[in-house]
Amino acid sequence: MDVRSFVRALPKAELHLHLEGALEPELMMRLAARNKVDIPFRSVEEVRAAYRFTRLQDFLDIYYRGMDVLRAEEDFHDLTAAYLERAAADGAVHVEVFFDPQGHAARGIPFAVAADGILAALAEGPERLGITSLLIMCVLRHLDEEDGFAAFREAAPYVADGRIAGLGLDSTEKNNPPAKFERLFAAAREAGLRLVAHAGEEGPASYVADAVDRLGVDRIDHGNHALDDPALVRRLAGLGIPLTVCPLSNLRLGGVADLRQHPLKRMLDAGLRATVNSDDPAYFGGYLLDNFVAVAEALQLEAADLVTLARNSIEASFLDEPAKRTHLDRLDRIAGAQG
Ligand code: ADE
Ligand code: ZN
């Protein structure tokens, strides 16, 4: 059986996905027209041609511009619904998605407009597509901690009743170390949120260590540069801290020159709980399954590695234990039948 069909059939969770990064050029053009937003592109081809970034900041500059077309609740709903369809088609049974409330607040879009639109689409997931979800709000690390606190305060009603399940940290990593957000993450933990942070994407191994030690995160998003510090790798493996790895993102942003040099296999061999994810699929040329197939082919991963990656994604999710058990039992049955 080919890799794509094999992996599609495995129950999987996607744990590192920015909804604003799932904004396909077609939808961007449609929303620009619907909301009468001026964008510097006249066609889908022109949008795609602009995606020539080679490092994180170049990408982020385009990403923050692109999200300007998102104005009404319905826009956030349509974006989320479109992503869920793609994820379900790739065999995802559960997704934990990020959004950037400060990226919208800066444009005058209240937290509730973005969150309610997203949550409405996520609520349709189980019945329409057989896919469950959790929503994680990310804080932009290039802004100061007080700005993050303002977003967190706006989110309070959503945090209180569980509509927001977690807090993440994204945007420009260099010179914005985890320590900058120590008080905010402590408050979020106190409020019962699960915690994640981008670390070691472009930043050093010490940022990964600090995300664990100073922010107390449950998962690391990316984590590639942790491999520069063998003692840290042993510690992450011992603690069982999952890494949400994004192969095509790493390729497009210059983290690796060629997928054959991607560290995913080394991570697995070192005992790290790595998972495969798509990050910003509309910008990086592939959804969940595309990431699996590309990295599997480049690294010549075996069926057992692919099953491990699927298992890691369920285990690393914030689902409750019975839900994890259900997915893992199904995974074992399917992997057993295919192997
Ligand atoms: N925001 C959206 N995608 C991101 C990434 N890969 N790294 C940091 N911030 C992001
Ligand atoms: Zn990311």
Image (tube, rainbow, N blue to C red):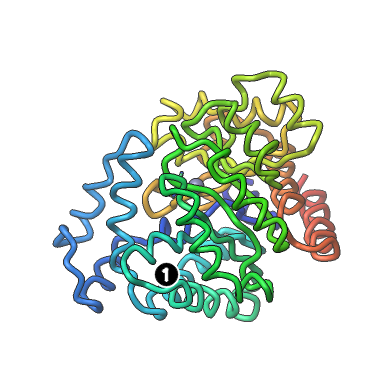
To which residue does mark 1 refer?
79
Q: Position of residue 216 (x, y in %)?
A: 70, 44
Q: Where is residue 30 in the image (x, y as percent from the top left)?
A: 26, 72
Task: Please state if 125 lies on the left or on the right of 21 as rendered.
Answer: right
Task: Please state if 209 lies on the left or on the right of 257 as rendered.
Answer: right
Image-quadrant location for residue 339? top right
Confirm if mark 1 falls within 8 A of ligand 1.
no
**SS under mark 1:** helix
**Residue drawn 51% across the image and 26% down it:** 260
Image-quadrant location for residue 122? bottom right
**Residue drawn 28% across the image and 46% down it:** 51
Q: Which amino acid does label 1 sit on?
A: Leu
Q: Where is residue 191 in the image (x, y as percent from the top left)?
A: 70, 63
Task: Please state if 43 lies on the left or on the right of 332 as rendered.
Answer: left
Looking at the picture, tell me which residue is in the foreground, 138 or 74: 138
**Residue drawn 53% across the image and 28% down it:** 262
